[in-house]
Amino acid sequence: MGRADVVVGAQWGDEGKGKWVHRMARDYKLVVRFQGGNNAGHTVYHHGQKFVLHHLPSAVLYPQVACALTAGMVINPVVLKQECHALEKQVQLSAVRLWISAAAHVITPWHIRLDRGREQEQAKPIGTTRRGIGPAYSTRALRCGLRMADYIDAKRCAGWITQMQGEPHFAVSQREDRQLWEDFARAADFLRPYVCAAETRVRQKIRAGDAVLCEGAQGTLLDINCGTYPYVTSSSTLAAAALCGVGFAPRACGKVYGIAKAYLTRVGNGPFPSELHGDTAAQLRQRGAEFGATTQRARRIGWLDCVALRYAQELNGFDGLVLNKLDILAGLPAVKLCVAYQHPEQGRLLEFPCDYRILEECQPVWEEYEGWTAAIPTQGRIAALPPAALAFVHRIENLAECTVIGVGTGIAAEDFLVR
């Protein structure tokens, strides 16, 4: 029996999962995306060139690694086709290397119209990427969605379109988004050769003893069940979601790795107790290039929240934590960690509250640490960090109750320290 290791975000997404999956993927036969859609934006630097991937796993640039998009995902066919075309000079995709689940649900122009309309109409919008992700998951739950197997069958796809004519805004979308629907129809021919029983193939790989890596999108605090609902994404972002999104037994799950940043960011609305404003926030945003890979929106910035990080550890059971962008904090006179919350009625809180309204009312309890001006080595061992930076990492381990096994020190795939 092989194993399926899982990599997930430990915060509100944008933690740098793409870099680490890309680095780790060389040791695996297969890398699998198990949830989300093109609301993900995983940035990878390969041989000095930047790639932003939305659907395809971060291992796609390695010709020896197969890639799978499985049933837990929602897929925009037009975007996926464009993404494949954009990589033509770097990789040669084939039906042997790229598996698209016949059971994955399809994002249509109608879903995108619904998403944008809902965000515009809400007095307090969620802050979605407006890519149609939520509506696609909604129609999946209502059992009236379009699956990839039906999409690539022209007759069945036409039947679904006829069936949906009475749904709100569907006919309007067909009339006003005509070019989008034409592109949508054409993408089926391109994707058809890759559509297969991807989940069966993944299980066969595991049974054969192969190592499989499951790549999550977004982050733990955006989980539809355990995140800051309703300011969450539309799927489960936890490590356990890999089992359901792909379909394999719990005993086949191997190691679980969490990816976090040495500070905290969030895109969109929702509570953020450790959020910063002013010069320090602006400095970290610019130094860390904190702008969304998918939306280009400026990310909200804060000090690392160790209450939330420990919550992520409890939900996922990380075998190891990677701490990215420690280099961005270099040169600051002092750095802080949020170690608890102070609520006006409930007092000091050490546990992450499940109600976003309680979290909105919380003030951070800080611990402040000496900064470091010494240069951080870009490669080597974590023990080689400047003493103040090493003490900072050790305190994070203590508060998050998890071992830091890697530290990101730059944008290149080779820029990291290990334990």
Image (spheres, helix red, strand yellow):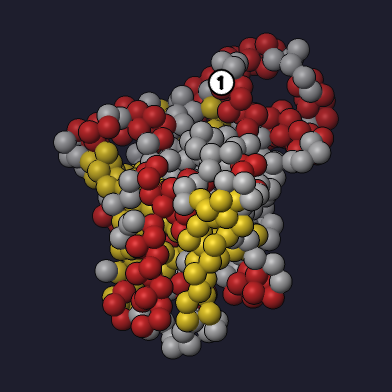
Figure quadrant of residue 385: bottom left
The residue at the point 56 percent across, 15 percent down is 143
Residue 95, above or below 154: below
- Residue occupied by mark 1: 141
The residue at the point 64 percent across, 74 percent down is 280
Q: Amino acid at mark 1?
A: Ala
The residue at the point 34 percent across, 69 percent down is 394
From the top left corner, tell me how far across and down residue 375 is, in percent. 44, 86
Give the camera-side residue of 43 and 190: 43
Direction from residue 51 to residue 66 in the image, left or right = left
Asked if residue 137 can be seen in this view, the reply is yes
Residue 286, above or below 233: below
From the top left corner, tell me how far across and down residue 156 is, in percent. 58, 14
**Which quadrant of the figure contains the N terminus?**
top left
Residue 101, above or below 153: below
From the top left corner, tell me how far across and down residue 34 is, in percent. 43, 37
Give the camera-side residue of 197 and 356: 356
Direction from residue 12 to residue 415 in the image, left or right = left
